[in-house]
Image (cartoon, rainbow, N blue to C red):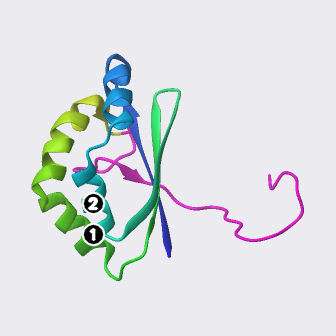
Amino acid sequence: MRRVATVIRLRPEKEEEYRALHAEVWPDVLAALHRAHISNYSIFLRDGLLFGYYEYGGDDLAADLARLAEDEVTRRWWQLTDPCQQPVASATEGEWWAPMEEVFHHDGPGRHGSAG
């Protein structure tokens, strides 16, 4: 299982609309994510930043993401969500949700407390 994290800015005037869209995500969008081997997908919001996290269980993430981008329902969904977002300043040319580097991960039993 590969963990993937990404970040993008939420336009402040679009927060209510973005929250409403994600309160009722279309079932066909969720099915497309499943076909792309994406699970445990979460989006978090803080101070105007959207942090996306998902787990990828396939063999070729780039190919699965390309197929997802070709899915008609997903493309219609993005027509609604994309205007709510803007790339972070460090995003490269053409990059929308910018990838994040994993600097720590703990998976399993251990002592309780801070991992700082």
Q: Say which quarter of the image contains residue 60.
A: bottom left
Q: Which residue does the numbered mark 1 point to in the structure image?
A: 35
The residue under the point 30% across, 61% down is: 33
Q: Amino acid at mark 2?
A: Ala
* Above-or-below relation of 11 to 94: above
Left or right, residue 35 beside residue 116: left
Residue in front for this viewpoint, 109 or 31 = 31
Residue 27: x, y in percent? 27, 50
Q: Are marks 1 and 2 in contact (CB under 8 Å)?
A: yes
Residue 61: x, y in percent? 32, 73
Q: Secondary structure at mark 2?
A: helix
Q: Main secondary structure of the magenta part?
A: loop
Q: Which residue does the numbered mark 2 point to in the structure image?
A: 31
Residue 19: x, y in percent? 38, 29
Q: Which residues are magenta?
A: 88-116
* Above-or-below relation of 86 to 107: above
The residue under the point 23% across, 37% down is: 82
Left or right, residue 71 beside residue 84: left
